[in-house]
Amino acid sequence: MRTGCLSLVVRVGVVSAAAVLAALSVALIFSFGLSALGQPEGISKIIKVLVATAAGFAFFLVGRGIWRDLRRRPSAGPEERSSEERGR
């Protein structure tokens, strides 16, 4: 297999595994919600779970954005590079 093809196969596998995990998580959350509906405080538990899920998702998105910004930023700033070039 070529490198590009292998990369595509790995990417499809990872995305498929992530989709399965997401579906299982949603099913687990809904089953928890359905079991909590019969209890007097069930609605508040459902709301707490949904808020916690949304907060976790937002935390993930912010962390991913910060990680991407840090990866794009060059290791040395423009002032440091110009002083290094002057010394050569």
Image (cartoon, grey):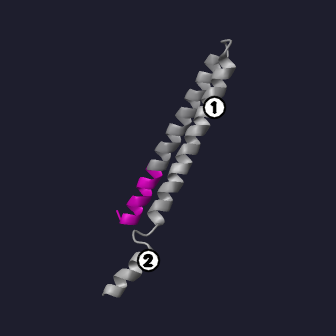
Vertical side of 84 occupied by 53: above or below: above
Q: Is 7 colored magenta in this rendering?
A: yes
Magenta range:
1-13
Which residue appears at 49% of the width and 44% of the height? 18
Provide residue 49's location: percent of width, then percent of height: 60, 28
Vertical side of 28 occupied by 55: above or below: below
Q: Secondary structure at mark 1?
A: helix
Which residue appears at 50% of the width and 61% of the height? 69
Q: Amino acid at mark 1?
A: Leu
- Residue 29 placement: quadrant: top right
Q: Secondary structure at mark 2?
A: helix
According to the picture, the residue beneath numbered tag 1 turns out to be 50
Provide residue 75's location: percent of width, then percent of height: 40, 68
- Residue 37 placement: quadrant: top right
Q: Earlier in the sequence, mark 1 or mark 2?
A: 1
Vertical side of 45 occupied by 88: above or below: below
Considering depth in this image, is 28 or 76 the residue closer to the camera? 76
Which label belongs to residue 79? 2
**Horizontally, is 85 left or right of 38 in the view?**
left
Considering depth in this image, is 21 or 88 the residue closer to the camera? 88
Considering depth in this image, is 84 or 67 the residue closer to the camera? 84
